[in-house]
Every structure is written in structure tokens, then in C-alpha cells.
Amino acid sequence: MIPFNLPYITGNEISYISDALASGSHAGNYNYNNRVKDLIFQKYGLEGVFLTPSCTAALEMGALLANIQLGDEVILPSFTFSSTANAILIFGAKPVFCEIRPSDMNIDVSQIEKLITPRTKMIIPIDYAGVPCDIDEIMIIAEKYNLTVMQDCAQSYGSLYKGEISGEKAHLACYSFHDTKNFSCGEGGALVVNKPEWRERAEYMAEKGTDRTKVIDGLQNKYSWIEKGSSYLLSDILAAMLLAQLEKEEEIKEKRKIIYDTYLSKLKKYESQGYFVIQHFEEYKKTNYHCFWLIFNSNRERELFIDLMKRKGIAAYSSYVPLHSSKMGLQLGYKKNDLPLTEDLAGRLVRLPLYPNLKTEDLESVIKATEEVLNEFKAA
Ligand SMILES: Cc1ncc(COP(=O)(O)O)c(C=O)c1O
């Protein structure tokens, strides 16, 4: 079976992890945490980076930092992972779901303003498949209504928006380093606090509400309880693995690009023949090649495609079940047809295998199998 995803090992993980083990400092905020933050700063100029145990934790920490509370409303796409909504739901806020655009499956900015009420406090757009959302336009709306924007960049570390890393323009941004993502330490994430005036509180919040970092930095002898907080730290052992991955960012991106570009060049003609549509996005957005998707003409065709590919030994996958129509969404009072476009698109989308070590012959097999299935569709 050709799997949908396989984590990539760069080669330096074991030596860095051994070094972290030997250091005797295994908790968060030690050597490898600092080295990862330095690397991100050197490469992208990002300051205020907090490494977290997951993107889920980063989103929660961001919601805590933005003071999300009972009764607040937060606008987000329904086409996302549960964590985007849970991050605010656990603080008592209400997720208000917004429609997406078919071209890139990201939030449809033209639909945001009509969802804003006096209770709206935050917008959480996501970068689906590693393609940046329309952050400039979202920030203009946020400014107008005095809202915080927390960009869920779970899939888009290394993607660019107008030449800058995606996540650089929002007030807060969250990355994932889970093993399904381009750069992985098994489970991991980061919160970027782009508002300098929020960074001190963020330090306390990540360290269980204490000023422990001041002790680590040699500024104080003792630490104590200062703020609300939790444990939002990434162990230095995992940070060591993450450093090995991020040092090879360009190598990983290049390998993924070759696969992505091959899918694009071989399958584009079928888009013109009306079998499916593929992702389209503006020139000033550069993907990190997280994923390659197709949207078929119907849910029935999508299901048939997945099934026929499986029989040919290839794992092609659908994506999120829209949150408003999931079990939890229905419990919150949403109905299936509340967001008809999201519902329809999510039911027709399929993702093809894409990972750095996908062998050339396997890539060819996926394309050949896709073509065979399309021919079966034509014959039917
Ligand atoms: C949009 C989005 N947000 C958040 C997450 C959660 O990331 P993590 O597994 O690092 O918590 C995911 C996971 O796939 C995701 O797709």
C-alpha cells in the first residue's frame, strides 16, 4: 500500500536528541528550545516564538493570552480541525462558522463582516493545505472592529505571504510540528506572539503562570505564581528533534515541491477536461507543498475515487468533516445546511499521497492509478 503520509527523518535527529539527553536539562526553555527559536528568528525574523507541546496547545495559549471568555464570539471556518474551535470553546466562547472559498478552501473574507456582532472578539483563519489565507484583508477587518486575529498556521510553517513567512502578520500565529506535518518532532507546535506587549504575560502563561524563565535566564533566584497559565512547554528532547528538522527545511520543501509539481503537470489536463478542480492561489502566496488536493464533481465520485485507489493499493484521503455538521457542531446548535458551500466542497475533496520519501515509481503509480480511475469514470 502506498501510504498517504510518512514522516521524514533528516539524519541529525538521533545525535541532537542524545546531546539533549546528556545535557541533563530535559524540560522546556533550555538549549534546544533556544536554538530552534534562534533558527526561526535568523530565517524569518520572527520574534516572540513560544514552543509548545502541539498546535492545539498553542491555540489554547493564544486564546488565554487574548483573554477569550464566556460569552465571546470567535469567527473561524467550519472547514478546519477540531482544535481550532476547541481552543476557544474551552474558555466558554462561541465558535461562529464562516464559509470558505472553493479556489483554496480558506476562509471567504467577503463573508466575515456580516458575522461580526458586539460580542465578537477574535477571528481564527487557517492556512489550508499550507496555502496562506488572505491575511492582509482579514487584518483590515480586525482593525476596523478592534478584533484579535489568531492565524492557525498548523499546516503552513515555511509558506510565504508577500515574501514573509505566513503567520508574521496576525496578532498571534500557531504552527504544528505533529508527525503529519512537513516538519515534525512527533508532537509539537509553536505560538508566535507578534504583539510585543503580550510577550511577558505569554512567558508566565507558558510556565504554569510563574516567572520561572527569569530564574533560567539567571535574573532571579526564585520563581513564583504571577499569572493565569498552564504547561505550554516543549520538552528540550523534542526540541532537539525539531531543530534537526528545521535545519533541513529547504531540503524537505524541495522534495515535496518535486512531487507537488509532478502532480500539477500530469493532472492539470484532467482539470481542463472537467474531471475535478485543483487548488488555485495568488502569485504572492507560496505554499510549503503540504498537500495536493482534487475536488471532484460530486461526493459520489470522490467516494468512488478513494475506494478504487484503495483497491489499487493507494491511500488517498478526504479531509475535515466540517465542524458545524460534526457531532459536536450539531450539539452546539448548528445544522447541516447552515454552511452549504463548505458542506458541498468538503464532501468532494480528496488528497493524494505527498511526503518527501515518496519514491519516483510510487509517484508514477499514483498518477497512473488516478488516470485509470478517471478513464473508468469516463466509461461509466
Ligand atoms: C488547522 C489545524 N489546526 C490545528 C491542528 C492541530 O495540530 P496539533 O496536532 O499539532 O495539535 C491541526 C492538525 O491537523 C490542523 O489541521
Image (spheres, rainbow, N blue to C red):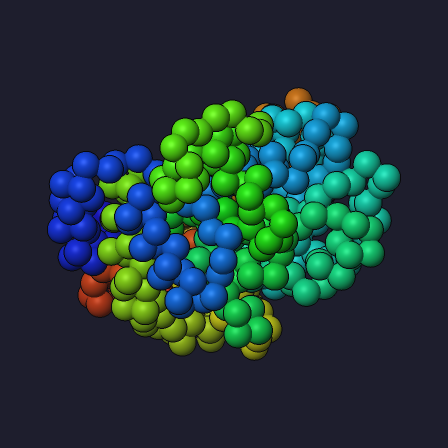
144, 272: nearer the viewer: 144
Measuring from the top left, give residue 192's x and y in whole percent.
52, 51
Measuring from the top left, give residue 369's x and y in whole percent.
32, 60
Q: Is residue 153 left or right of residue 134?
A: left
Whether residue 192 is visible here, answered yes or no, is yes
Is residue 54 placed above or below 352 in the rendered structure? above
Whether residue 379 is visible here, answered yes or no, is no
Which image quadrant is residue 189 in? top left
- The residue depicted at 14 percent of the width and 44 percent of the height is 18
- The residue depicted at 47 percent of the width and 66 percent of the height is 45
Q: Is residue 43 left or right of residue 338?
A: left
**Count of numbered circles on the image:** 0
Residue farthest to the right, as pictured: 118
302, 334: nearer the viewer: 334
- The residue depicted at 71 percent of the width and 39 percent of the height is 74
Measuring from the top left, give residue 298's x and y in whole percent.
57, 51
191, 318: nearer the viewer: 191
Q: Is residue 2 left or right of residue 268?
A: left
Q: Is residue 302 left or right of residue 11?
A: right
- The residue depicted at 60 percent of the width and 53 percent of the height is 196
Residue farthest to the top, as pictured: 331
Measuring from the top left, give residue 257's x and y in whole percent.
36, 70
